[in-house]
Image (cartoon, grey):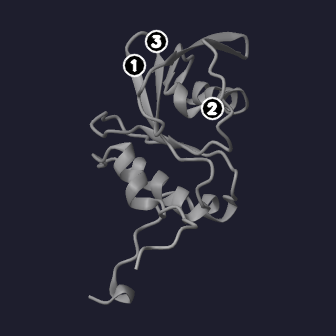
Amino acid sequence: MAESDAPTPPKLLPEEIHRAVRPGTALLRLRTTHSREGVLDGAWWPRSRTLADELPALIQVLTEHLGPLTRVGLDSAAWEEVPTRVVVDGRVVHLDSFPVGDDTVLITRGDTDHFALLVVPPDTTPDAARDAMARAVRADNVTQATEILVATLPEPATDREEPA
């Protein structure tokens, strides 16, 4: 099959988002199903690795849709200066730092309700970010975050020459 004959993957995010996304835009999309069978519940494309700048906005958006959040779990190696808690709109949200991988953020509502979000690296191109986010929010997705990123993100450019 020629490359031009390959089917174009569906754009699962609303068309307005595909037109509006620019490099550095933070996006969040939660899967809206009653089933919790998928691996991921959503995706997040932060503008930077500065948690103090990025996390409050994510918490505000999630609180609007999910209700009050109690904890956020993340890999401290992937972020700059991770505090033990943040206060957003007068509510304390505790941060748990453990090696979940820099490609995932775990959100807790109440004591036992957990949501896993794919984290798209801030320097990702808009097309690659949209593709990764669309795969993460599919109701039938059973692919881990790392595999989604490997499959959708271009390989980093290198300045070294290949050996002859």
* Mark toward the start of the polypeptide (2 vs 1): 2
CA gap, disc 3 and disc 2: 17 Å
Query: Front-most of 156 and 37?
Result: 156
Up/down of 84 relative to 28, above or below = above
Q: Are marks 1 and 3 in contact (CB under 8 Å)?
A: yes
Residue in the picture at 31% in, 48% down: 141
Residue 86, image x, y percentages: 67, 15
In the rendered structure, find residue 58 and report the number of the disc placed on it. Answer: 2
**Secondary structure beneath label 2:** helix
Q: Is 77 positioned to the left or the right of 52 in the image?
A: left
Amino acid at dot 2:
Leu
SS class of the residue under badge 1?
strand
Disc 3 packing (10 Å; few <14; some 14–19; many ≥20): few
Q: Which of marks 3 and 2 is in front?
A: 2
Q: Which mark is residue 113?
A: 1
Find residue 79 and report its horizontal and vertical position in percent. 60, 31
Residue tagged by mark 3?
110
Q: Residue 37 carries which label?
A: none
Label 1 and label 3: CA atoms lie apart by 6 Å
Tell me residue 149's x, y (percent): 43, 52
The quadrant in which residue 163 appears is: bottom left
Locate the C terminus by quadrant. Answer: bottom left
Query: Which amino acid type is marked by label 3?
Result: Gly
The answer to whether residue 156 is left or right of residue 38 is right
Residue located at (41% from left, 37% from top): 41
* Nearer-the-camera pick, 164 or 84: 164
* Residue located at (32% from left, 39% from top): 39
Residue type of the residue flagged with mark 1 = Asp
Per the model, the C-alpha gap separating discs 2 and 1 is 17 Å
